Image (spheres, rainbow, N blue to C red):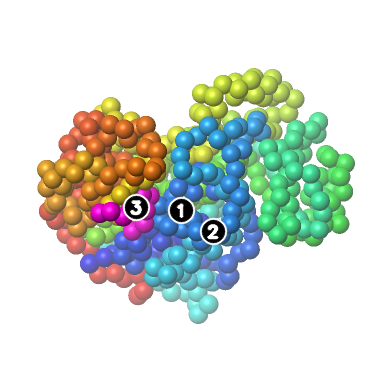
Amino acid sequence: MSGSVIITGAGPAGLALAGELRLAGIEVTVLERLSGRTAESRGIGLTLRTVETFAQRGLLRRLGDVTTSEQGHFGGVPLDLGVLDGAYRSAKTVPQSVTETVLEQWARELGADIRRGHEFRSYREEDASVAVRVGTPQGERTLRADYLVGADGGRSSVRKAGGFDFPGTAATTELLLADVRGVEVTPRMTGELLSAGMVMSAPLPGGVHRVIVGERGAPPRRRSGPPAFQEVADTWKRLTGDDISHAEPVWVSAFTDAARQAAEYRRGRVLLTGDAAHIHLPAGGQGMNTGIQDSVNLGWKLAAVLHGTAPKSLLDTYHCERHAVGKELLANTAAQSQLILGGAQAQPLRDVLAELVRYEEVTRHLAAKVSGLSIRYDVGPGPNPLLGVRMPHLGLTVRGRRTSSTALLHTGRGVLLDLADNPHLRRRAAPWRERIDIVTATHDTEVTVPPALHATTAVLIRPDGYVAWAGPGSHHDLPAALSRWFGPARRAFPSPRPSQANQ
């Protein structure tokens, strides 16, 4: 019997989690305070790791025509992302509104119950469920589910209601943002440092330009709503001398350099994902992308626990793995904040970094960091270079049909990939056949094999795309790895009680 999950927030993290859970057959109710889908662009790109994540669920084509790019930056210092290996490139022209539309359509097609105009009020954790008080168009009511996930942004009501500690640093400065139409703006893709502050601009689809401006010494203001566009235009003119006041504002907002991270991503039956778990200066659009990846990490683990095939301790790996990623995210965006907002005193540091990125090894390191490719989870010791990293895109032939390691993950199940037609390996994995796909394949001779796979004969891939075991070269044997990530070979945990999400 499957369980149920209530998710608060229909942003990218919440919708990605809803889709992941529905792939695994878990009942999902998404509560969204807003009555309609927002048209705000917010994040305007997908990092390389998120593009890979969309590809492994077959969602890339739904984004339509996108502009890929090999250009990035670290704190305004240009980076050549082309040094990174892989079959994909980051997408630079995908507004967050498009990302949310794609994820919502996918989640709804899979059967997610998305309720707009429903506002989270409070929750009470009970022995075997979570009771959630919700404001609806028909008045307040209580919903129950096995788990509650807060995906409701940086000001998360779930996080506050649960008393999750949210340590970090308070805002020291404020930046203004506007998407404008009807004016030509010189592109400043990696930002431009001026004597009085910083400006950044980038073209968006539909003749829209995004402008960001930060005036040095401008303290953060307590706002009850977005700034007036005239405030953005006036600041832009003071810093650049250009007048954009005649433009049509599509969206106006403000943000700060506050940086905080939840001390716990899970407390009992309540979990946090996305901005509810971490906030920071939005340098390079990493926040939304990290949030989506949080949810992809969480979804299959939560589903396995609810299906009764894995113990609740599997959920502890969500905090361990993703809290470390979030900590690194705050560190690299804090460094970029100093480079972008540090003024003249930071210029020597920018000059030194600009010299260092001439070395490919330095560029590769920083490019991997901002693209999400530097992640390696602790799946156990061993010399195989694939252990703990995301499975590279690998062209395959299965029963005479061409496919890929990426396509094998479309269903959201784990995959044991046998590249040596090893019947002994398949027999050892057979007790887990209901939980993973066991696939015998050969390398596609028309596609280059990544170097890390030259001597690898078998790979166990988790549903989130990361390698849990590889042979040869893992100090754990295959059954131990299967038990760790997919539960013991025979059911040893009681089935969860029937779903209560719609009561």
Q: Position of residue 375 (x, y in %)?
A: 42, 36
Image position, residue 449 (x, y; %) = 37, 37
Quick one: which residue is furthest to the bottom in this view? 138
Residue beneath label 3, please? 402
Q: Give the mark nearest the N terminus, 2 or 3.
A: 2
* Other-residue count near label 3 (Cα within 10 Å), few / some / many at <14 / 14–19 / ≥20: few
The residue type indicated by label 2 comes to Leu
Task: Please give the residue where the numbered disc 2 appears in the rendered image.
Answer: 63
As drawn, 194 above or below 491: above
In front: 342, or 419? 419
Q: Nearer the viewer, residue 429 or 10?
A: 429
Q: Residue at x 87, y 48 (%)?
A: 243
In the figure, 162 relative to 284: above or below?
below
Q: Quadrant of residue 460?
A: top left
Which residue shows up at 39% across the image and 68% down it? 110
Say which of 118 and 458 sits in front: 458
The circle on residue 54 is: 1
Which of labels 2 and 3 is toward the front?
3
